[in-house]
Image (cartoon, rainbow, N blue to C red):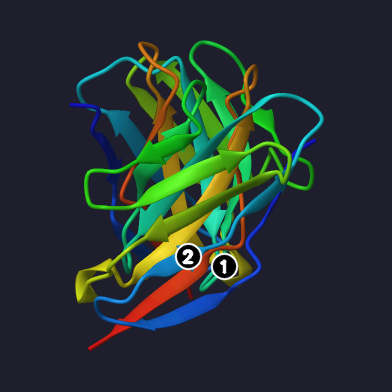
Amino acid sequence: GAVVSQHPSWVICKSGTSVKIECRSLDFQATTMFWYRQFPKQSLMLMATSNEGSKATYEQGVEKDKFLINHASLTLSTLTVTSAHPEDSSFYICSARADFRNEQFFGPGTRLTVL
Amino acid sequence: AQSVTQLDSQVPVFEEAPVELRCNYSSSVSVYLFWYVQYPNQGLQLLLKYLSGSTLVESINGFEAEFNKSQTSFHLRKPSVHISDTAEYFCAVSDESSYKLIFGSGTRLLVRP
């Protein structure tokens, strides 16, 4: 139990296009999901906290108009990187906090490469 | 605000030797502490966690960590490592209200034959 999936697992896009990444909790409900980005050989940096049915809370320095987050249901959150540029290339990881216990479960990550 | 320090960016060790990965944290409130493992190009897997109770916590694959409040540490140990333990290990802290995880910079454990 407590599986989180991400789709796609990798994506390559041209500069200026938008990319949507999905994060799903497959067998549990998650009122809260989190989005992280990880640069090569670095730690995870929290980008935003996504709450079902409400606006996401962004960390300082993260552009909310560039990284659009939608948490439309208790099992799905999406991150859209708008007008992507090469500096947005990174490994994006989501996690879902299980409502039934105090633990976050992580997705396998999505590698975004912007050409 | 919380922060996590992992002083060792890489720890090389021979197979079957013991290992300790260090983690120190700072926080003005009570915290939960976690160790996660990340294999190449994968997400994070929870290794073990401290929420309350016994300060010594163990994982199913032989790792253990001890919460030391006075030293604000949560070091990860294993008495005998395997080649398959080679991975990146992240220490993380969260407070009891926000559930946001703050990660350390990570320690790469490299187990050599």
Residue B22 sits in which quadrant? bottom right
- A61 vs A25, left or right, is right
Q: Amino acid at mark 2?
A: Glu
Q: For the point 37% across and 59% down, which residue is it?
A: B38
Give the residue furthest to the bottom: B113
Q: For the point 46% across and 55% down, which residue is it?
A: B76
Name the one closer to the observer, A96 or B38. Answer: B38
- Where is residue A86 shown, x and y percent of the image? 57, 71
Residue that numbered label 1 is attached to? A42
Question: Secondary structure beneath disc 1?
Answer: loop
Image position of B18 with respect to A69: above or below? below
Image quadrant in which the N terminus of chain B is located = top right
Image position of A65 with respect to B111: above or below? above
Image position of B28 with respect to A114: above or below? above
- Where is residue B5 shown, x and y percent of the image? 68, 57
Inspect this view and state whether residue A97 appears: yes
Name the one closer to the observer, A86 or A15. Answer: A86
Image quadrant in which the C terminus of chain B is located = bottom left
Residue that numbered label 2 is attached to? B20
Q: For the point 35% across and 38% down, which residue is it?
A: A22
- A45 vs A96, left or right, is right
Q: How many marks?
A: 2
Question: Secondary structure beneath disc 2?
Answer: strand
Residue A57 sits in which quadrant? top right
- Where is residue A7 shown, x and y percent of the image? 28, 46
Instruction: Chain letter for mark 1, please.
Output: A
> Alpha-carbon distance for marks 1 and 2?
20 Å
Cβ–Cβ under 8 Å for marks 1 and 2: no
Q: Amino acid at mark 1?
A: Gln
Instruction: Chain letter for mark 2, please.
Output: B
